[in-house]
Image: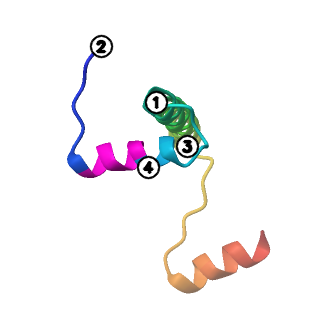
Amino acid sequence: MNFSLTPSLEQFVRDRAASGDYNNASEVVRDAIRLLKRAEERRALKMDRLRAAIRQGDEALAIGEFTDLDSDRELDEFFAEL
């Protein structure tokens, strides 16, 4: 697999490899891809949780399980009681 980097990213990879934390540029790129993969997995998990919470909220609304608040004062009082 071949890919191109901008000059600044290429320099960053070279600098990281030269720092001694990595043996070569390939290790830097592999580590970066692993970090990106983890970030994407966390993002997907958060989205799944958000979708589930939205479904629960929709279901609660459908069966009338909600509190209707008409003002900032009512909202403040509601959260103060939690």
Q: Are marks 1 and 3 in contact (CB under 8 Å)?
A: no
Q: Nearer the viewer, mark 1 or mark 2?
A: 2
Residue 70 coordinates in the image, percent (x, y): 49, 75
**Which residue corresponds to mark 2?**
1
**Which residue corresponds to mark 4?**
15
Residue 19 coordinates in the image, percent (x, y): 55, 49
User: Quadrant location of residue 53?
Assistant: top right
Q: Which tag, 4 or 1, sits closer to the chain's start?
A: 4
Residue 22 belongs to magenta span: no
Q: CA distance from mark 1 to mark 2?
A: 14 Å
Secondary structure under badge 4?
Answer: helix
Q: Amino acid at mark 3?
A: Gly
Which portion, as a residue range, is magenta? Answer: 8-14
| Front one among 76 and 15 | 15
Secondary structure under badge 1?
Answer: helix
**Which residue corresponds to mark 3?**
57
Q: Which tag, 1 or 2, sits closer to the chain's start?
A: 2
Q: Which tag, 4 or 2, sits closer to the chain's start?
A: 2
